[in-house]
Image (cartoon, rainbow, N blue to C red):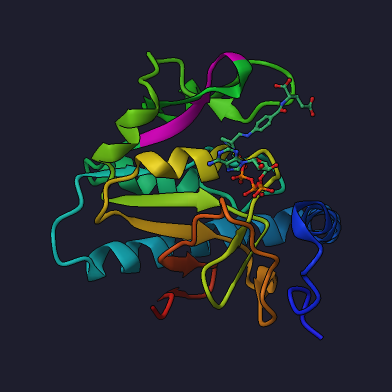
């Protein structure tokens, strides 16, 4: 039975199920070797380049994330975008985890600015609305299903942030290959489905 088939218990039931899935995903991530992480990061950049080439309009601004060690690595992707002159917005957490964005400058500029937070650029942060400039939004996820439902870290940060994406932006969940779920993930009212999925070996549009 799929994990969503018995999802009738309302938000509390859904939270529990999502939490179990997060625990499993984090355990798989922790067990991945550094060699596998490096290779996955290279695949992410290569697949992203394919995705960007498939966009009819030239992409001049994207949003991405500065990966933590166990996440699908974005260092080669950020490098590639930078080399192509693409403006890259990265999440910056303001007070109370407020959603802001700052421009990627280079790898050396990224640093963990506060314990427990992802690396961030040093430059000035814009407000949540700045996301509207991005034609493609590469969103971190712990899992994604066939319908584009994304399992995030559980803070609701991206679900809230994505309300400010441009209506025609392509929102892409970035996951490892073993995080694509055949069974439906638990879905809640606030979950914003993604339009595409990117893994180290492949990328595809979610059928609508
Ligand atoms: N690389 C990356 N960046 C990302 C995300 C992500 O999943 N990956 N996010 C996806 O949503 C957002 C950040 N989400 C966060 C949500 C909560 C806390 C948080 O509660 N931090 C605590 C310390 C926690 C600890 O010590 O373990 C704090 O700041 O007090 C941090 C980041 C935006 N940037
Ligand atoms: N648009 C929203 N407005 C208010 N609360 C929200 C919104 N989106 C999510 N939340 C709250 O955030 C919490 C976490 O949501 P959820 O479990 O879907 O996070 P997630 O998608 O895994 O995390 P993230 O979006 O940070 O990657 C939930 O308790 C939910 O109530």
The residue sitting at 15% across, 67% down in the picture is 56
**Residue in front for this viewpoint, 156 or 56:** 156
Q: Which picture quadrant has residue 102? A: top left
Q: Against 106, is 171 above or below?
A: below
Specify the quadrant that holds the C terminus: bottom left
| Residue 63 pos. (x, y %) | 38, 42
- The residue sitting at the bottom extreme is 1
Q: Position of residue 122 (x, y in %)?
A: 46, 15
Of the four image quadrants, the one with ligand 2 is top right
The picture places residue 54, in percent across and down from the top left corner, at: 24, 71
Residue 121 picture location, percent across and down: 46, 22
- Residue 82 left/right relative to 17: left
37 magenta-colored: no
| Vertical arrangement, residue 199 with respect to residue 72, above or below | below
Q: Quadrant of residue 206?
A: bottom left
Q: How many marks?
A: 0
Q: Along the horizontal axis of the image, is 105 left or right of 56?
A: right
Placement of 33 over or under 81, stated as above or below: below
In the image, is residue 93 part of the stretch drawn in magenta? yes
Helix, strand or loop: magenta stretch: strand
Which quadrant is the N terminus positioned in?
A: bottom right
- Name the residue at 54% across, 67% down: 200
- In the image, the segment drawn in magenta is 89-95
User: Relative to 150, is 6 on the left or the right?
Assistant: right
- Residue visible at 75% across and 53% down? 11
Q: Residue at x 83, y 58 (%)?
A: 13
Name, please, the residue furthest toward the left: 57
């Amino acid at each position: 039975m799929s994990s969503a088939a018995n999802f009738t218990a309302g938000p509390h039931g859904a939270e529990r199920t999502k939490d179990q899935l997060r625990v499993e995903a984090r355990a798989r991530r922790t067990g991945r070797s550094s060699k596998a992480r490096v290779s996955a990061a290279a695949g992410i950049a290569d697949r992203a380049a394919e995705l960007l080439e498939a966009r009819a309009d030239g992409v001049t601004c994207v949003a991405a994330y500065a990966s933590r060690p166990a996440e699908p690595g974005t260092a080669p992707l950020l490098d590639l975008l930078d080399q192509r002159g693409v403006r890259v917005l990265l999440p910056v957490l303001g007070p109370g985890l407020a959603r802001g964005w700052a421009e990627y400058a280079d790898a050396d500029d990224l640093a963990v600015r506060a314990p427990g937070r992802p690396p961030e650029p040093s430059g000035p942060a814009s407000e949540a609305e700045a996301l509207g400039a991005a034609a493609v939004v590469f969103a971190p996820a712990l899992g994604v299903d066939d319908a584009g439902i994304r399992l995030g870290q559980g803070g609701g940060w991206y679900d809230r942030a994505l309300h400010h994406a441009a209506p025609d932006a392509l929102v892409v969940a970035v996951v490892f290959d073993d995080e694509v779920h055949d069974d439906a993930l638990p879905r809640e009212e606030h979950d914003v489905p993604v339009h595409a999925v990117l893994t180290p070996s492949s990328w595809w549009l979610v059928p609508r």
